[in-house]
Image (spheres, grey):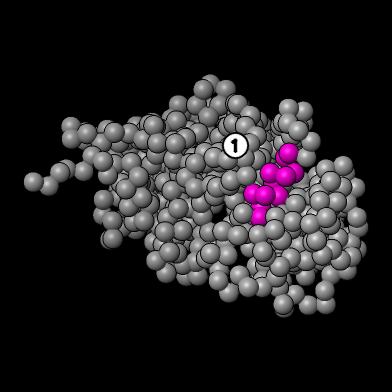
Amino acid sequence: MTASSYFSPKDDSIALLTLAELRALEARAAAALPPHTLMARAGAAAAQCLLDTFEHDPESTALPVWLAAGPGNNGGDALVMAEQLHRAGVKVRVCMPVEVKPDDARWALESARAAGVVIDQEPPASFDEYGWLVDGLFGIGLTRPLEGVFATIATRLSRHARVLALDIPSGLNSDTGAPVGVGDAVRASATITFIGAKPGQFTADGRDLCGKLFVATIGVEPPAAPSIVLNAPALFAPAMPPRDNGTNKGTFGTLAVIGGDTGMCGAPVLAGRMALYGGAGKVNIAFLSDGFPPYDPPHPELMLHHADDLKLDRMDALAIGCGMGKSDRAKRLLSDALKLDIPKLLDADALNLIAKDDALASAVASCGTRGDPCILTPHPLEAARLLQSDDAKAVQTDRFQAARQLSARYASVVVLKGSGTIVASPDGRLVVNPTGNAGLATGGTGDVLGGLIGALLAQKLPAFEAALAGVYLHGLAAQSLTDEGIGPAGLTAGELAPEVRKLINRLFYAQHAPRRM
C-alpha cells in the first residue's frame, strides 16, 4: 500500500485511534518526515478517493467539485485535495471563509493559489451546479460547537446527496461519535479518514454522519496496542467449538432462559428459539408465569418449565431477564441464580432489578471477582439506571466512558447496545461492533441477542468472546436480511434466528461440510 492509498474497513479488526493516540502518532511521524508530508499525503489520498468515485458515479463526473476549507489543518487538506483535482483536469472551487492559519495549511494555500485554484470567501447561493461537495471545515481537533458561517455551511452541506468529509464530518467528536458540545455536525455520504479510523466513526451518531468510510493510513503505522478495536470474526472465531462427527448434544451445552412473567411469555420464547438456532445442544425455558404454554408448536425441541421446577445448577449457562418482570419472586430467582458458578447473561428486567438493589449489584460484581464475570446487555436507558441515573442522553454523549464505568462497577463484560454496540471487559478491553442496522429497531431483537449470547456461553465460549460473536452475528443477520429486501422496515425479531444459523455455518463450519462423491 502506498502512502496515498486508502481502503474501506471490511471484516477486519482494525485499531480505532483516540485523539490522544492520533496526536502522538502525528508528532512522531512529522518529526521523521520532510515538512508538509502528512498533509500532502492526506490531500492526495482524498483526491484519489474522489477520482475513483467518479468511475462509479458518471452523473457527477462532468460537474465541478466544491470544497469548504476551514481555518485549520483540515482546511489545508482540502486545499491540497483541490490542487490535486485541479491538476487532474477536474473543475474545482474552494470556499475559505477565514484564511488558514497553521504553517502546513499556509503552505497548502500558497501551493493551491500558485496552481490556479479558484478560492472564494463566501459560499454560493446554490450548490445545484456542483456534483460533489467536500467538507474540509474542521477535523478531530474541534473543541466547541460550529458557529456562524461554519454552522451555516455545515447545515447546507448536510442537505446535499454527495458530500465527502475529510477525516471526520465537521462537528463530530471523533472519540465519542456525539456532536461536539450541543451543536450540529455535517451529515456526509462518505468520509475519508487519515492515519486510522476513529472510535466515534462507528458508534452513536458517527455511523450515520460518516456514511461510507475510507481509511488512508498515509504511511503512518498504528500503535502496537490500541485502546479500542473494531469487532471482526478474527476476535472470536478461534473460540467457536469444533463440530466433529463424534460430538453429541451434551457437547454443545444446556442453556436455561429465565423470564416470562404473566403477559411476557413471548420474550423468553424468542430467546430460546434463537438459542436453538445458535447451536446450543439443549435449551430450557423457565417461566415465572403460571400460565406458560405447554410447548412451543414451531419448536417443540424447546423444553418449557415453571421456574420453580427447573434445577438451574444442572445448566451450562443461564440467560436471565427476558420478560422477567420486577416482582419479589423475580428478585429471589435472580439472587439464587447469581450464587451459582455458571456463566450468566443478564438482560432487560434483570438489569433493572440490579440497578435498584445494592445486594444484587454486589452479587453480580462478586461473580467477576471469583473469575466468572456476568455479561450485562443494557440499552442506553438501562445503562443509565445501572449507573444510578435516568439520563440516557448522558450515556450516549460518551458511550465508551459509560461502558468502561459499567464494566468496572459490576466486574462484568458489558454489551452497551445501540448503533455501534460497545463490548467492554473488566480487564480494560474495548471493542466496537460494526454490524447491524435500523432493522433491529423493533421489539424482541434484544431478547434474540440474549438468547444467542446465552447459546454461545453454553457452548463454552468465554464471556468476552461470546459477547463479541453474539453482537457481530446478530447485526450481520439484520444486514443480510435487509440485502434480501426483508428489512430494515418490517424486519421482525423472529426472522433473525434462521439467518444467524446460516451465517454461523457459512462462516465457521462450511469447510467441514461432507464432500459429495
Name the residue at 65% across, 40% down: 218
Where residue 447 appears, x then y in whole percent?
A: 47, 52
Q: Is residue 366 left or right of residue 309?
A: right
Where residue 176 appears, x then y in whole percent?
A: 71, 46
Main SS category, magenta section: helix
**Above or below — where is 424 with respect to 446?**
above
Q: Amino acid at mark 1?
A: Ala
Name the residue at 44% across, 36% down: 234
Q: Which residue is mark 1?
A: 15
Q: Is residue 464 left or right of residue 360?
A: left
Residue 387 visible (yes or no): no
Classify the position of the N terminus by image quarter. top right
Q: Is residue 387 left or right of residue 370?
A: right
**Above or below — where is 509 with respect to 418?**
above
Where residue 467 appears, x then y in whole percent?
A: 49, 39
Name the residue at 41% across, 51% down: 271
Mark 1 falls on what kind of element?
strand
Highlighted magenta segment, given as a residue range: 37-47
Name the residue at 61% across, 55% down: 49
**Above or below — where is 253 with respect to 348?**
above
Q: How many marks?
A: 1
- Structural crowding at the residue carrying mark 1, measured as other residues with C-alpha within 10 Å and reported as few (<14), some (14–19) or many (≥20): many
